[in-house]
Image: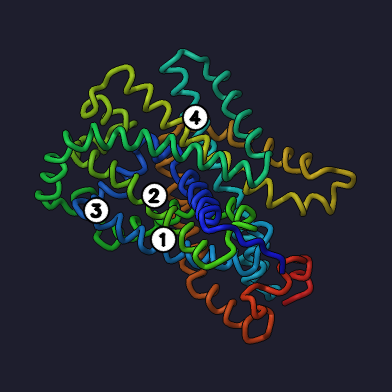
Amino acid sequence: MTTTKKSGFASMLASASLGAVMFSSYVGPGFASGTQTVQYFLTKGWIGVFLGLIVCGALALIVNLMTFEFNRVYRPLNYREQADLIYRGKAPRLIIGTFVDIHGFLTPIVSVAAQISACSLLLNNLWGLPIPVGTVLYCAVVIALALFGAHVVRVTGSFLTCAILAVTLYIGITGIPNAWEGCMQFIAEGSTPEDYGFSTIDAWYIMIVFMSNFLCGGNACVNASRGVLVTRKDVIFSSVTNIFLCVAATMVYTVVFAAGMPEIANESLPTLWAIQNLCGGARGAQIIYAVLAIAAMLSTGIALTFGVANRWDKTLEKVWKNSTSFMRQASVAILIILICTVGSTFGILNIVKYGFTYLAKISWPVLCCLPCFTIPWRIAKDKKEGLIGPDGYYIHADSLEKIAEEG
């Protein structure tokens, strides 16, 4: 297998960019609006402010480390090949692989549909841009940037992550001092999940299931990992970067939003409420919120669209003769965007409340729990059978067509 070792700083920078892609995939419309944070954590009572989020992040880190280590050792080309490398038998491939493909197709549809709805409304409310025009502009940017390849996805994710972190930092600095007393009062009152209609078991299940949101950029990072995850240090640095950013950024909002509980649970845009009530509410602050929301939505839309387009590139090559990779990926990206545009008519609140929640509940056991057992087993089995060389890499990683011959 061919690998290129970078200098220490270059390796850290590349690894950090991969973690940034994962984080930028997480901070989508649900994060930007604040609805996601409130519904998953704060409606579970005082445990949702810190404890539930920390437990969720710790479990997500374990899965992130395992999947990135698998990408480092095997270097799959896309998320379907990743699944086929883990589950070699014909029956597991058919069942798990098909599930992965369906989930990989539904995730961007649900997320990007919410993004289109939210972004077009935001542009209309703040600058009076007609909703159809805002929809076309957003879709065009997502398609264009998603088609430039893994390198551009990493660079774009890093840039947008910086913008998102800057705005989140602003909200934290201006909002937390004003919200801290209310947050501590919310915790001191000791509200329970039952107060919001959840049992304790259901509340913890929902908060833990949320870890799939921290890992939703995994599909895009399968191909983007190639040449970046060279050593285990790269795996650790990328994974820790992603989870730390996810937990820290979300905690800013759990603290700020806790000051508005329980009333804020009925707000359509909790983040806007926080800006208006805790951050001054000036026009400049509202524009900053627009920057956060649009950057968050773009970063997620680009990574998810790239992941699906990359997945179906090689499959379409077999049936679409004389086509280029760009033509195939562009066709998939445009199809995804067209479906999402139709889906956006359901509205962001319904998409977040129902689409995000049910998709996470269904996918979590297969995509988050199962790999914790199957990935270590697969690596150990391949080492025993001599399929992982002395250098620690899968011996067929440079010719993954051999996957089809195994089983």
C-alpha span from label 1 to label 3: 15 Å
Q: Is residue 297 left or right of residue 142?
A: left
Q: Which residue is mark 1?
A: 60
Q: Nearer the viewer, mark 4 or mark 1?
A: 1
Closer-to-camera residue (43/154): 154
State which tag comes first along the sequence, 1 or 3: 3
Q: Nearer the viewer, mark 4 or mark 3?
A: 3
Q: Which residue is mark 3?
A: 50
State the mark number for residue 117.
4
State the mark number for residue 246.
2
**Residue 28's spot in the image, x, y percent?**
46, 40
Disc 4 marks a residue whose amino acid type is: Ser
Closer-to-camera residue (341/173): 173
Disc 3 marks a residue whose amino acid type is: Phe
Give above or below for 207 relative to 32: below
C-alpha span from label 2 to label 4: 23 Å
Q: Residue at x 61, y 75 (%)?
A: 392
Give the quadrant of residue 33.
Answer: top left
